[in-house]
Image (cartoon, rainbow, N blue to C red):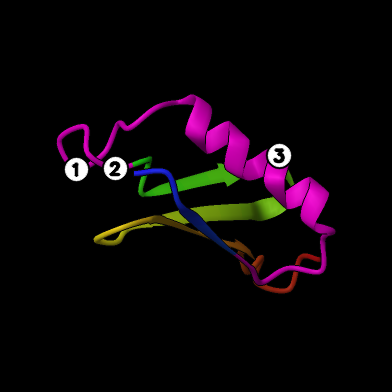
């Protein structure tokens, strides 16, 4: 599988988002019995990367986690 889908739901530029995705990919496929990248990874500034394993691609959704009024 060589295709990835990146959905940036933040206001961060794509070059920064690619760094988060690279961080998840560098860990390897550690979820779902070694078939999938980490289900959910939290980075600084409450940035979350969640992954999905599709039939022909890996999907990465990047969003800012709610801080309950602490922004």
Give the residue drawn at x 39%, y 27%: 28
Q: Position of residue 27 (x, y in %)?
A: 45, 26
Q: Position of residue 51 (x, y in %)?
A: 41, 55
Q: Which mark is residue 20?
A: none
Which secondary structure, mark 1? loop
Which secondary structure, mark 3? helix
**Horizontally, is 61 left or right of 9 in the view?**
left
Q: Position of residue 22 (x, y in %)?
A: 61, 35
| 44 over 27 or under it: above or below | below
Q: Which mark is residue 19?
A: 3
- From the image, which quarter does the C terminus lie in? bottom right
In the image, residue 68 lies in the stretch drawn in magenta: no
Which of the marked residues, 2 or 3, is nearer the chain's N terminus? 3
Q: CA distance from mark 3 to mark 1?
A: 23 Å
Where does the magenta region start and end? 7-36
Q: Which mark is residue 36?
A: 2
| 16 over 71 or under it: above or below | above
Q: CA distance from mark 2 to mark 3?
A: 18 Å
- Marks 2/3 in contact by CB < 8 Å: the verdict is no
The quarter of the picture where residue 68 lies is bottom right
Q: Residues within 10 Å of mark 1 (few under 14, many from 20)?
A: few
Give the residue drawn at x 66%, y 53%: 46
Q: Residues within 10 Å of mark 3 (few under 14, many from 20)?
A: few
């Amino acid at each position: 599988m060589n295709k990835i889908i990146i959905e940036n739901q933040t206001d961060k530029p794509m070059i920064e988002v690619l760094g988060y995705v690279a961080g998840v990919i560098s860990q390897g496929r550690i979820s779902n019995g070694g078939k999938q990248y980490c289900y959910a990874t939290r980075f600084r500034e409450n940035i979350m990367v969640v992954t999905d394993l599709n039939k022909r691609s890996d999907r990465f959704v990047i969003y800012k986690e709610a801080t309950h009024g602490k922004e």
